[in-house]
Image (tube, rainbow, N blue to C red):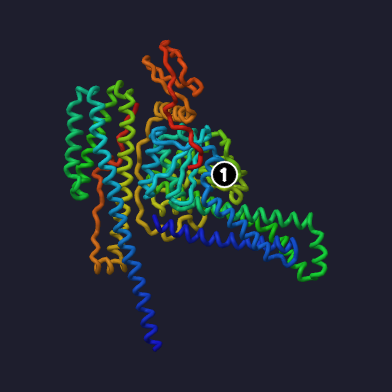
Amino acid sequence: MIAMLVLLAVIVVVGLWVMGLYNGLVGSRNEVKNSWSQIDVQLKRRHDLIPNLVEAVKGYMGHERGTLEAVTKARQQAVDLSSASAEDRAKVENALSQTLRSLFAVAEAYPDLKANQNFLALQEELTATENKISFARQYYNDAVLRLNNRIQMFPSSIIAGAFNFQMEQFFQVDAPEDRQVPQVKF
Amino acid sequence: MWELVRANQRRAATLVVVMAALLFAVGYAAGEALRPGAGLGGLFVAFVVWVVLSLVSYYSGDSIFLSLAGAHKIAKSDNPTLYNVVEEMCIASGISRVPDIYVIDDAAPNAFATGRDPQHASVAVTAGLLETLNREELQGVIAHELGHVANRDVLYMMMVGVMLGAIVLLADVGTRVMFYGGGRRRTSSREGGQGQAVILILAVVLMILAPLIAQLVYLAVSRRREYLADACSALYTRYPEGLASALEKISHSTAKLASASRATAPMYIVNPLGATAKGLADLSSTHPPTSERIRILRSMGGGAGYRQYDEAFRKVTGRPVGVVPATSLQQAAPAAVAAPAAPDARARFERVRQTTDMLWRLNQYAFIACACGTTLKVPPAYVGKEIACPHCGAKHVVPAATGAPPQAAAS
């Protein structure tokens, strides 16, 4: 009788423990999903802002057709791939960041443009969106790290294996300078 | 991140229980002092006082606080940069709702956060802060405030503050009764004999000591939470230098915040009443010394995680125990990002202009863009009248202000 009770108690305790580990894994996985959607929102916002920027700049920067076209093209690529894997998207979005940075750098040479309120407002919005993308990416990568740690570390690795939890991809940044937002001086 | 929040909640719950015990003990003692045997009545009074104060501060503490500070709510169009920075830090901290943003019309740079949980949070900054700090520094300050929000610091500081207030109040009433209304007490204590006298002496000691103990506990918690919010700021921004240089600028400012008082001082990022005398600073101040906070942030050695903050904390203060709960230290250590420092002179001019324009708008001034390039800022008294541009002489009819109407500080 006593042996039965002890056995029952052990089973209950182990069951609760497994439940805790399982719930922790599910929580981490949901956190990854949720933070990915944050990045998604911000990337989309950037895609929406860029046509306005190109429109605002066009009149002032007639001689910089190449730069403007590069931005438009990079944006189109990013929009086309917007349902691809994290890795592919990271690549095209990083390329878009690069072209935007060169656009803002070129804009320095146009004092009229820098006095344009519309351009300044768009610039603030894009700077903020760049920052938001990088903070969302930071949060996403932290969430991925937590999930992957749980999947690989003992003892939750056993539960993760049993319930087939998959490791997630980090949202990589190619070069360290990609982390920096385009800085435009006036 | 959530381990930290949970560890904080456990610790705060313990603290709330300790303070509640102290409060009820004082209530009991005050009751005994009033009339021997009335201890339970005193306990009851203490309980009622505590419940009423807690409910009031839980549901309207933030709006009371914001109106005491003279804060105005702003919309995104009033100051897009500030608004964007708050949104950025919300994303970095994983807070799902962007807090309400308030501005205080004061030249002293400072900031605070309030609200009982992340769903009911508000962040307030002074105009002086917006003018003084560049974008990276502003990010650091806002991240510190959102650290308070994420850790539920505001709620606990409020609850503990309320209990402190109740303890001080009851002890005060109790001692007054002992000294002035003691007629009945004296006669009955003679009847009660020695046991009664011992209880009375204990009651007196308790009523003198309890407010002091409660105050010290409160202050220790307040300081610890400032350090923790600094650690959060470093983690969210991955750029400890931003907050460090913001703290430096804030502490170098000589302006005093007009609307701050001793009751509201613990809420601000840097003590708005100025530092206390050096020797007493350790026990009797609401904030850790700013220079120490800056040194900790700057000795994080290229890292930005809780662990680096904890190591830096122990190195700088020489204390053996860090500030970050152990469960949060096991996380992997993220590296800091070196953000480029923006050139400040021209940017600062723009910030000052943006901030003052925002304040004009909050005060119902109308903005008229004249064809000659001048922007006229006209006080509300001139609405509907015709005025001439001081530069080119062109005539304008003053429209009603287009800015946001002044809002009550309460949300």
Residue at the spot of label 1: B265
Compared to B285, does B33 lie above or below? Answer: below
Could you tell me if residue B50 is visible in this image? yes
* Horizontal and vertical percent position of residue A125: 32, 35
Residue at x 59% of width, y 61% of height: B20
Compared to B259, does B201 lie above or below? Answer: below
Residue at x 48% of width, y 53% of height: B314
Q: In this view, does A16 lie to the left or right of B297?
A: left
Q: Is residue B102 left or right of residue B188?
A: left
Q: Which amino acid does label 1 sit on?
A: Ala
Name the residue furthest top: B393
Secondary structure under tag 1 reads: helix
* Horizontal and vertical percent position of residue B237: 38, 45
| Closer to the camera in the image, B256 or B281 | B256
| Closer to the camera in the image, A113 or A12 | A12
Quadrant including the N terminus of chain A = bottom left
Badge 1: residue crowd in 10 Å (few <14, some 14–19, many ≥20): many
Disc 1 chain ID? B
Compared to B92, does A113 lie above or below? Answer: above
Q: In this view, does A156 lie to the left or right of A68?
A: right
Q: How many labels does the image show?
A: 1
Residue at x 68% of width, y 62% of height: B42
* Horizontal and vertical percent position of residue B404: 44, 32
* Horizontal and vertical percent position of residue B77: 39, 33
Residue at x 45% of width, y 15% of height: B386
| Closer to the camera in the image, B190 or B328 | B190
Could you tell me if residue B303 is visible in this image? no
| Closer to the camera in the image, B142 or B285 | B142
Quadrant including the C terminus of chain A = top left
